[in-house]
Image: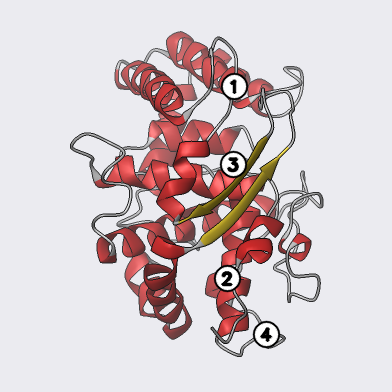
Amino acid sequence: MNKTDFLRDPSVGDFVSWLARTLPTLPVDLKLKRSRFVPATVNRKIVGLDAVLSSYVWQSVGMPNGDWSETRHRLLTLANALKAAVGANDDVAALNACREILAWGGNRDWAKGAFPFLQARANAGTLCRYLRDTRHAFILASADTDRLCPPVELLNSMLTKVHALCSSDGLPIYDSRVAAAVATLVEMWRNQAGKAGTPLPAALAFPATTQTRTVRHAFPDAVAPGVMLYGASATCPQWASAKVRLGGLMQAVLEQCPDMFSACIATPTLGDRMHAFEASLFMIGYNVACLTRASPPANQ
């Protein structure tokens, strides 16, 4: 399924229209506890998805405060380093750039998962070729969700960051928080449209990456899209498809809402606004109950 077919799906079209109407005035009751990446508690009632960006926080390695302005600058630096290395076909520099991305992302075990996968390709002299091939497959305008794996061989919460920063069209990071947030928005729409309990459209199935963050933390009775299992053969195509479909949704919503995320960035591109959109979903995904706590009843 390509982007055109995806957006022609009636359920997708209805959901995009609902998002375009709803997100500018979406109530969010954001409550975050202190943690490794959140230096101070957050307790704010916010109106509008783009307003969530003012509460963004991810205080990673070498970041004094981790707010969105600092994070955006850090991500631009990381992305530029990776793209330059891939463009120069320099596997050593590409691996170093990937290592910096994983460090920013909070990689916990350098002996497992993303880094050994990338290191093996660098050692074989194929890392840049792999990243070029996967970048081409992930281009949102032409990506086919049925033909992403291969060339994509593995996806997890760290590799999704590498692929997003290697892209140039706003391909989103699809991690546990973003996955939970978009699945919750789908369920909010289904509830308000009187579709709760009906089969979940395949085009709008955004699976969770962990049991600790799912749509059921907001809607216990939701028809959930499931949880992807690390190491399972189905996980890579499921993850890649969700990543691309989310990107298509975000682009379609931002095209209908030209002012959304425009005020927070000087002369923003669509890609800039896409990453701001993703960052706001990320914050909601810390605890998706922030939407049900703040949202009005479905009939209002």
One can see residue 71 in this view? yes
- Amino acid at dot 4: Ala
Mark 4–mark 2 CB contact (< 8 Å): no
Residue 257 image position (x, y, % from top left): 28, 62
Q: Nearer the viewer, mark 2 or mark 3?
A: 2
For the C terminus, give its image quadrant.
bottom right
The residue sitting at 33% across, 58% down in the picture is 251
The tag earlier along the polypeptide, 4 or 3, is: 3
The residue sitting at 72% across, 52% down in the picture is 233
One can see residue 206 in this view? no
Residue 88 image position (x, y, % from top left): 30, 15
Query: Disc 1 designates what residue?
Result: 59
The tag earlier along the polypeptide, 2 or 3, is: 3
- Give the answer, above or below, for where 240 lies relative to 175: below
Residue farthest toward the left in the current orientation of the protein: 267
Pick the front one: 210 or 264: 264
Query: Disc 2 designates what residue?
Result: 186
Q: Is residue 42 left or right of residue 169?
A: right
The residue sitting at 57% across, 70% down in the picture is 186
- The answer to which quarter of the image holds residue 143 is bottom left
Residue 57 image position (x, y, % from top left): 56, 31
Q: Secondary structure at mark 4?
A: loop
- The answer to which quarter of the image holds residue 25 is bottom left
* Numbered tag placed on residue 196 in the rendering: 4
Query: Disc 3 designates what residue?
Result: 153
The tag earlier along the polypeptide, 4 or 1, is: 1
Mark 2–mark 3 CB contact (< 8 Å): no
